[in-house]
Image (spheres, rainbow, N blue to C red):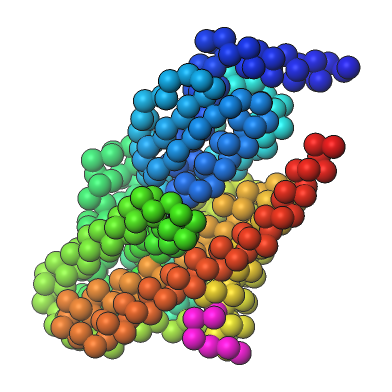
């Protein structure tokens, strides 16, 4: 027996003896890991599966229940642990930290690290700073908004509007950093400032467009990924978690809409002038092909992505992009959203198993902004406030069906790759 095997055996024996210190160490490790993963916005279905895989690797009997803001963990025959707040703040973790957390998970799923060392490693990861600092956040968000603007509505005026308003939101994100109370009202403030800036440009004739010009700058706050994750959790049987995410997403949309309406009143712009003709022109001409790499480079700086993860993120995003285009062009309806989500899930899963091990969550996250369910929902609410009820109902139906299509793509893709995952695990255990 080599040294690594003896170390692994000693770790497992220490835990299996169920002495207080070992069980306590495993409990703290699982708790800290679960809190970190939920803070990143990962679905409770995935978090629970990860924690259960880790306890299986260490031969520890466990019962685990995960909610978006709460963890309940029971190890062995010990009494159930108290509910632990997870303080979920989606997007609060830089993506390089998420990638490093998954590297730790890969080790723990093979019992290659002790729970005590695992807990220390989590603290080290979460204490790391943003790779590019405040300047990177500012420049990254401008590129993020410009790239998304070129994807959604490829015009020169959209380019200018997205860059200018993106700079405003970038400054707000920097000012709100490490200020939790300010973060709570950040969506309203961002919507107010961006709408005031852009509606003034529309009123003065500098910018021509509709409420759609707001979307690139406010995209970070639009809860498209939250809606989709919520629907995915509902379909997976996590009723409480799924419904709470959907309700949270609706609340964020109303906060954004409130800020936009205040900005509209400040400028004195009639609602019908910017709402009645609101539309998004997705994937028009060759410009979006340029917008995608700009968008990804913006995310690289803004979301603090590791260098080795960047090519895989770009690959998965293009796969989702072409899948949506193909489905919309050849089949129509909501098949584009389904096919894009399906291919995104498949490709992201295989990327996660590549030698470079870019986590699927990291590789597919940018694609949610391309599938734009949150943008459509924002426009549907704006149409309702503008008393364009027929348009509001049509847009609301579209966003619901888009979210369903994306969630179905995630479920079908996960169902297809799951047998491959099980086969891989079995082959390693033999």
Which residue is painted at 59% across and 22% down in the image? 115
Q: Nearer the viewer, residue 167 or 408?
A: 408
Which residue is painted at 39% across and 53% down in the image? 239
Which residue is painted at 38% across and 73% down in the image? 400
Horizontal arrangement in the rendering, residue 176 relative to residue 334 (left or right)? left
Q: Position of residue 184 (x, y in %)?
A: 25, 47
Residue 373 in sight:
yes
Res. 14 image quadrant = top right
Residue 225 in sight:
no
Res. 379 image quadrant = bottom left
Q: Residue 159 in magenta?
A: no
376 to 296, vertically: above or below: below
Q: Position of residue 155 (x, y in %)?
A: 44, 83
Q: How many marks?
A: 0
Res. 310 image quadrant = bottom right
Residue sticking out furthest to the right: 1
387 to 314, vertically: above or below: below
286 to 88, vertically: above or below: below
Residue extent of the magenta highlight: 330-336
Residue sticking out furthest to the front: 77
Which residue is painted at 38% across and 50% down in the image? 241
- Give the quadrant of the N terminus: top right
Q: Position of residue 52 (x, y in %)?
A: 58, 36
Q: Nearer the viewer, residue 141 or 411?
A: 411
- Give the quadrant of the C terminus: top right
Q: Position of residue 178 (x, y in %)?
A: 33, 37
Q: Nearer the viewer, residue 41 or 1?
A: 1
């Amino acid at each position: 027996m080599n040294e690594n095997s003896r170390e692994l055996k000693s770790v497992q024996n220490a835990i299996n003896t169920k002495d207080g210190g070992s069980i306590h160490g495993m409990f703290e490790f699982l708790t800290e890991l679960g809190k970190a993963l939920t803070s990143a916005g990962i679905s409770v279905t995935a978090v629970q599966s990860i924690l259960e895989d880790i306890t299986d690797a260490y031969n520890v009997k466990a019962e685990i229940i995960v909610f978006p803001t709460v963890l309940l963990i029971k190890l062995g025959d010990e009494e159930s642990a108290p509910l632990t707040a997870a303080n979920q703040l989606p997007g609060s973790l830089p993506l390089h930290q998420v990638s490093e957390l998954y590297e730790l998970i890969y080790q723990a799923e093979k019992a290659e690290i002790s729970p005590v060392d695992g807990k220390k490693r989590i603290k080290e990861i979460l204490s790391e700073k943003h790779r590019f600092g405040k300047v990177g956040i500012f420049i990254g968000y401008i590129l993020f908004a410009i790239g998304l603007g070129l994807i959604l509505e490829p015009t020169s005026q959209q380019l200018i509007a997205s860059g200018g308003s993106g700079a405003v939101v970038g400054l707000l994100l920097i000012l709100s950093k490490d200020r939790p109370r300010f973060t709570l009202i950040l969506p309203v403030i961002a919507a107010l400032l961006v709408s005031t800036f852009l509606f003034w440009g529309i009123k003065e004739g500098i910018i021509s467009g509709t409420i759609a010009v707001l979307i690139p700058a406010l995209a970070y706050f639009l809860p498209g990924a939250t809606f989709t994750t919520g629907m995915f959790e509902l379909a997976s049987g996590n009723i409480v978690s799924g419904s709470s995410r959907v309700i949270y997403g609706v609340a964020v949309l109303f906060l954004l809409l409130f800020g936009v309406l205040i900005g509209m009143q400040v400028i004195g712009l009639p609602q019908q002038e910017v709402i009645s003709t609101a539309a998004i022109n997705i994937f028009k001409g060759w410009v979006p092909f340029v917008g995608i790499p700009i968008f990804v480079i913006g995310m690289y700086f803004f979301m603090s992505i590791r260098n080795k993860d960047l090519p895989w993120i770009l690959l998965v995003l293009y796969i989702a992009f072409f899948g949506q285009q193909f489905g919309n062009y050849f089949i129509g309806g909501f098949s584009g959203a389904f096919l894009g989500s399906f291919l995104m899930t498949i490709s992201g899963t295989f990327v996660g198993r590549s030698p470079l091990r870019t986590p699927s969550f990291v590789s597919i996250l940018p694609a949610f902004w391309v599938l734009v369910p949150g943008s459509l929902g924002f426009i549907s609410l704006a149409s309702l406030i503008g008393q364009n009820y027929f348009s509001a109902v049509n847009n609301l139906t579209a966003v619901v069906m888009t979210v369903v299509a994306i969630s179905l793509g995630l479920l079908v893709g996960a169902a297809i790759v799951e047998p491959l995952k099980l086969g891989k695990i079995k082959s390693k255990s033999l």
